[in-house]
Image (tube, helix red, strand yellow):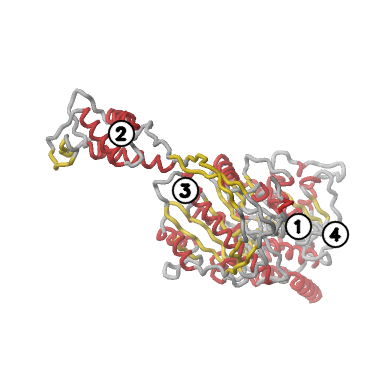
Amino acid sequence: MRLRLYRLDEVYEEVVRLARFRAPQKGAFDALHKIVKDLDEDLPRLSQERLVEQLRERGFHVPNGVPYFVYHLATGVGKTRLMGAVISYLYRSGQTKNVLILAPRTAIVDRVERLVQVGNPKFLFLDPMLVPEPNLCFRSNLETFQPRHDALNVFVLSPQSISGGDRRFGRRSEFRGESLEEYLSGAEDLVVFTDEAHHLGADNEAAWTSAIHALRPKLHFGLTATPKAGPGVNVLYSYDLTQCLQEGLFTKAVDVLVDGRDEAMSDEEWDRYTIDYALRRLERKREALRLYADRREDFDFVEPVALICARDIAHAEEVAGWLVDRRAITPDQLLVTHSGRTQTEEDIARLVAIDQPGAKIRLVVNVFQLTEGWDVTNVYVIAPLRAMATFQGAVQTMGRGLRLPAGKRVGDPDADVLDVLCFGRENLEEILKAATETFGVEAEAGPPVGVATKDEKEESEPPIPRKQIVIPLIRPVELMMPNVRQVPADPPLDFDVATAGDLAGGAATAIDLASLETTGLDERVGYDFDDVLRIAAARIVAGLRYLSDVKHGSSVEDLVRRFLESLGASHETPLYTDPVKVAIHLSDEIDRRYRLQGGAYEQAGVSIVRPTDVTWLIPEGLAGPVDRVDVSQWHQ
């Protein structure tokens, strides 16, 4: 017994030394080490019944015969590294040679498959000294995989693979003579790890849990940032997002920026307003990261990324098209991902390598595909659009932006803070209340995230220090530049106006028909249809500067006529509808549509432009904004 404890402690020290744990990871790892030390024998030598008995004696719940422990760690703290350290410890200390890693999403399975391969710079098992040559079983080699008794057998699968309809997992192979299901259920040392383990608590995923229980693993570990309570769930260690953000040690801080929607703007206009602000925030982050990279030799500049969350596939494609057409975002700076797009190997490689030095992607447009399993470090702005532009919608994607590219905070608020935009119908007070309730803190203490209006944020920020540089002219040139002038657009007058309730009845305004001046209120005033038509049309033309009676008079009268008829007016009965209110209402409708129109331009001559030296303001510490290019290298 003493020799066993000595061996466990020796492996423990070895793993801790190589893992370089953060404090929460260390606490979680220590909890496991204590459980294993408290057992009176190694896992392969313990029967399932004896193991369960010992764990129950120590206060753990094991109602179904499979011990299940949950690591509750906030996103960005390092669940994956903890899992690798635990597996290395269990293998090196003789507890297991068979490990099944389950991940519910394809993106997570793909990532783990890469991490378990020797040679990966983020090798899951910390160092090949601990796990020299893991024997790897993936979805691609289920039929041909051959377990070994002299190595750690690592199975990286999805829950669907062990419970799905194709049953390749349960099919016998000519290479093995038995199925992988039979092999693992007969192993005396199987340990299962489930990433994003909160999925196992869902009713429609109960088959996954049943499939795991059927394998009778000695231990089952779940890793998640959002654990779900249930029978047999033992939270072995907890370090939640609230504590993580309050301590501010391992992830970015979070600022929720609020701006109330202008109801006069359409959905498309508000999307573009939101995205334009996200681009401005992104540029500020970029300058901060560039300055930090220029000062540090141990940090390579990474391009900060904005994650834009669209409502559906059509919305995502519309947003992406607008970014390319109207904001000059190039294809290598934009990545669109949703279920309607088949991701090529190149797309997947770009998505995975998005936080690597030299990557050019600045914007990722998705339909909530990237809520899990996308663990990059350089997401700095998150912008949910439309129905998702609420605090709860923002929280769903917040985890994708918490990781830090330098692995720690660097002391610059622009490089250390994730901006989450809540530009919608919720006001500041509503979002503060939602944030307090979400993070489970007292209202007086306030949430562990910053919540401020867009204007408050901008007013509180110091300007980025800049210096002035001069780029001298290399060679005098003359450029022929066309002059353009704006051509007034024709106002839209051929549309149907929805009836306004307050115009349908009530008293009319008494009007002098000669001067069209209001003389007071008289409930007995009634007008002839043509009089109301003439009064309202005349006031509309007089009130809008871009209308003229000669050019637009008949169209305005036609618009007023159609509107009056929509109210039920006729030539046969007097109208008690107020012509002034009709004029004001229709003027607003015309003006709103006129302002939404794009301007038209025409050429008006040509000017000769002679460029001179250019003076630029750039962030301090930046060597220069562009490389100078000789005229002979210009492309037409």
* CB atoms of marks 1 and 2 within 8 Å: no
Within 10 Å of the Cα at label 4, are there few (<14), some (14-19), or many (20+) other Cα atoms? some
Q: Earlier in the sequence, mark 4 or mark 2?
A: 4
| Residue at horizontal 72 percent and vertical 43 percent from the top | 344
Within 10 Å of the Cα at label 2, are there few (<14), some (14-19), or many (20+) other Cα atoms? some
> Residue 291 location, x and y as percent?
64, 68
Q: Is residue 105 above or below residue 303?
A: above
Foreground tag (4 vs 2): 2
Residue sitting nearer the eye, 518 or 565: 518
Foreground tag (3 vs 1): 3
Q: Earlier in the sequence, mark 4 or mark 1?
A: 1
Q: Which mark is residue 133?
A: 4
Report the residue marked by disc 1: 115
Q: Earlier in the sequence, mark 1 or mark 2?
A: 1
Report the residue marked by disc 3: 270
Q: Quadrant of the N terminus?
A: bottom right
Name which residue type carries label 4.
Glu
In screen coordinates, is 307 left or right of 559? right
Q: Which mark is residue 289?
A: none
> Residue 576 location, x and y as percent?
18, 33
Secondary structure of the residue carrying numbered label 3: helix
